[in-house]
Image: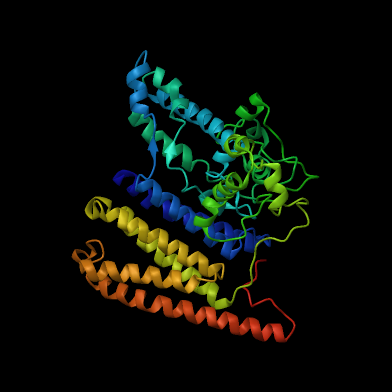
């Protein structure tokens, strides 16, 4: 937990700089693939995911350590060959899990957040799930367990394998020659993120593309079929917490309203998107039929809302960086209280971006929670011993934040009314291109 937090403390600013560099590069080249609110949503999604991981809010029914103790027939030494074996085994396991996530209704809920952006950029890589609480697929590491590979090697290679999947989420790199035959490239992954019928459920590989070629799930990017990104059932929100549980909510409702007990049970394990016929007829769900004629989710926003969203993101990154750098000092149960605060922060922030009906109340709840921690403990998770002035700054932030939120909501409503009277319902935006 503590070691992972320190790794993230180094990795987060690197990822952030690369994401911002891609935005600058797109602006410079006249091909901006990064929309402001979409990027902020991606970054907040990344924050919720790493917070959940650092807090260890998931369990494995079978641990790798237990598997090794039961099935190992030898014990390989820790040399470069062993590390290579682990990398390949992890990649194959990742391919299988990825394919299952796409093809089974229940498991799709844990992965759809990664596909929820209607853009394709480095920020998409940060859209990772918080809805997986039980890890079922440790058994896929059986080849490594049979070889008796040290769990510490798995712990080292796994984050490297994950981080190596970041770079290919971009539209600024074309096809890469002979590398297209070996590794997953941006071209391959653009196909994977596309909602065009020919591209759906293709290219599940994470590092090596040959798994897809072996198992028949490979599809090259076609110049005559430009990829269109997102989900066939769009999420229509910037809120990553809502996105993470949208599909699960739909499954629960469909299972509840289905008349047949057979349908109530099998809906969880049917192919992704399957719904009981009686429920589908009664409760219609919008689905994109033509990828080239749908409107992206892009609700009008004022200049002040955009500025305030970036300010809030800076505060959020500050809060999360302090957590990751001081996990051992904060200790338990403090880290879980801190985690709850982070999730509430993200929900309040992105609900305001959505201009949600209860945005002001979520912001008030966040600030009351923060003020409660400060008042009850007289501290902010032992920060007083390092920088006591921060306590006063936090009091000021929690008192001012709801005021800004209320002002932005009222200002947005006022501008919208003025523009409606002028026959224009679009608020002022920063340009995307």
Q: Position of residue 416 (x, y in %)?
A: 64, 81
Q: Nearer the viewer, residue 403 or 106?
A: 106
Q: Which residue is rendered at x = 25% and y = 61% of the image?
A: 381
Q: Quadrant of the N terminus?
A: top left
Q: Which is nearer the eye, 77 or 393? A: 393
Residue pictured at 68% horizontal, 53% vertical: 283
| The C terminus sits in image quarter | bottom right
In which quarter of the view is residue 47 placed? bottom left
Residue 295 location, quadrant: bottom right
Residue 157 in sight from this viewpoint: yes
- At horizontal 43% and vertical 38% (from top left) the residue drawn is 134
Give x and y (percent) for residue 228.
71, 51
Tag count: 0
Q: Residue at x 50, y 71 (%)?
A: 358
Q: Can you say whether 397 is above or below 56 in the image?
A: below
Residue 167, horizontal then vertical, whole percent = 55, 46
Q: Position of residue 12 (x, y in %)?
A: 42, 53
Q: In this orientation, does residue 205 appear? A: no
């Amino acid at each position: 937990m503590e070691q992972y937090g320190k790794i993230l403390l180094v990795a987060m600013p690197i990822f952030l700089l690369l994401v911002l560099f891609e935005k600058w590069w797109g602006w410079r080249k006249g091909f901006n693939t990064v929309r402001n609110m979409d990027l902020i949503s991606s970054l907040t999604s990344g924050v919720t995911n790493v917070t959940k991981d650092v807090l260890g809010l998931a369990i494995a029914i079978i641990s790798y350590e237990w598997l090794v103790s039961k099935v190992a027939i030898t014990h390989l030494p820790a040399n470069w060959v062993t590390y290579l074996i682990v990398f390949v085994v992890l990649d194959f396991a990742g391919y299988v899990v990825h394919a299952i996530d796409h093809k089974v209704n229940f498991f799709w809920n844990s992965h759809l957040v990664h596909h929820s952006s209607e853009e394709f950029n480095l920020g998409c890589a940060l859209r990772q799930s918080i809805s997986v609480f039980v890890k079922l697929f440790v058994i896929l590491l059986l080849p490594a367990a049979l070889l008796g590979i040290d769990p510490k090697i798995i712990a080292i290679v796994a984050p490297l394998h994950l981080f190596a999947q970041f770079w290919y989420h971009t539209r600024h790199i074309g096809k890469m020659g002979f590398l297209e035959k070996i590794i997953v490239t941006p071209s391959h992954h653009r196909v994977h993120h596309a909602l065009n019928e020919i591209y759906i459920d293709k290219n599940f590989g994470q590092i090596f593309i040959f798994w897809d070629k072996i198992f028949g799930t490979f599809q090259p990017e076609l110049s005559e079929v430009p990829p269109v990104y997102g989900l066939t059932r769009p999420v229509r929100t910037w809120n990553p917490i809502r996105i993470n549980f949208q599909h699960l909510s739909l499954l629960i409702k469909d299972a509840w309203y289905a008349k047949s007990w057979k349908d109530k049970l099998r809906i969880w394990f049917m192919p992704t998107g399957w719904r009981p016929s009686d429920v589908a007829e009664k409760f219609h769900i919008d689905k994109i039929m033509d990828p080239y004629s749908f409107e992206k989710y892009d609700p009008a926003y004022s200049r002040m809302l955009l500025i305030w969203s970036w300010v809030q993101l800076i505060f959020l990154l500050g809060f999360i960086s302090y957590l990751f750098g001081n996990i051992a000092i904060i200790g338990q149960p403090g880290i879980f209280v801190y985690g709850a605060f982070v999730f509430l922060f993200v929900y309040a922030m992105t609900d305001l971006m959505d201009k949600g009906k209860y945005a002001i109340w979520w912001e008030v709840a966040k600030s009351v929670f923060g003020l409660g921690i400060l008042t009850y403990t007289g501290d902010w998770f032992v920060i007083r011993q390092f920088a006591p002035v921060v306590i006063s700054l936090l009091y000021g932030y929690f008192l001012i934040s709801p005021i800004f939120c209320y002002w932005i909501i009222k200002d947005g409503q006022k501008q919208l009314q003025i523009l409606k009277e002028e026959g224009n319902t679009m608020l002022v935006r920063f340009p995307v291109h």
